[in-house]
Image: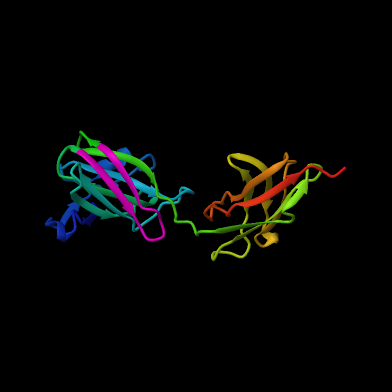
Amino acid sequence: MHVRTVVAAVAAAGLCVVPFAMSADAATSHPQATAAAPHAAASSPLIKGVVVDQSGKAIDDVKVQALDKKGKPVASALTYASQWASGPQHGFFFVEVGAKGTYSLTLSKSGYDTRTISGLEVTKRRLALGELTLKKTLPSTKTTAELSDKSITTKEKGEIEVKVSTSATKRPTGDIEILEGRRVVGEATLKAGAKGEVSVVLDKLGVGSHHLVASYLGSSSLKASKSGSVTLVVKKPRR
């Protein structure tokens, strides 16, 4: 039998640190388990799950805090690598909430967006949540836009030079859209070799002033961003 000490709640909340013995019956609730797995042997109701990132990779050392319906912390723990017959299950956690009822969980770790899951109804001794996704905090970006020509005729197509910059990389990639309100009037793909710069040719636009914004749609590793507005004036050609 594997024994693991779980912090039931922080000392500031007035709750004690309780040692829990892990029993073999948790193996029946894990699809890969064929032998004893860590779990609380106590009869007090608990919530368990596995925390993963966007790619499905399990994350250890995530703080998991359970709060009652009044928002009072009742238990907390860190995700860790529990031991299964098939190998360690990283990102695993369980928190003993002490009583049946409605709870919320807060998941937090540096470098990730904090997540709160509300309305968890604990009606039995165990509530198994399965995988919970915690998203990595993506680096911010800055998008700027500059018109090649501020005034064109209806026979011409406008062109905008778009630049995307970020402290994370000198070679951001992703899709660019030029918007007039909600309407897309130009598109391009930012490639790594372009070093954050791309020229976007616009659709033909009618006579008048067109207020345009360059929108970088982001990527799996970078946040999206938008430029300030630039104004393109389209005129009738001279006869």
Relative side of 70 to 151, left or right: left
Residue 108 x %, y %: 33, 55
Closer to the camera in the image, 27 or 198: 198
Relative side of 24 to 179, left or right: left
The residue positioned 22% from the left and 43% from the top of the image is 46
Residue 38 in view, yes or no: no
**What quarter of the picture does the C terminus occupy?**
top right
Q: Of helix, strand and loop, which mostly describes the magenta segment? A: strand
Q: Is residue 103 magenta?
A: yes
- The correct choice, above or below, for 29 with respect to 214 in the image is above
Protein image colouring:
rainbow
Residue 89 x %, y %: 37, 50
- The correct choice, above or below, for 172 with respect to 176 in the image is below
The residue positioned 37% from the left and 61% from the top of the image is 110
Relative side of 25 to 111, left or right: left
**Location of residue 18 (image quadrant):** bottom left
Q: How many numbered marks does the figure carry?
A: 0
The extreme top residue here reads 123
Residue 54 x %, y %: 47, 48
The extreme right residue here reads 239
**Location of residue 202 (image quadrant):** top right
The residue positioned 37% from the left and 45% from the top of the image is 132
Closer to the camera in the image, 203 or 91: 203
Residue 212 x %, y %: 63, 48
Q: Is residue 119 magenta?
A: yes
**Location of residue 98 (image quadrant):** top left
The residue positioned 65% from the left and 60% from the top of the image is 196
Q: Which residues are magenta?
A: 102-120
Residue 26 in view, yes or no: yes
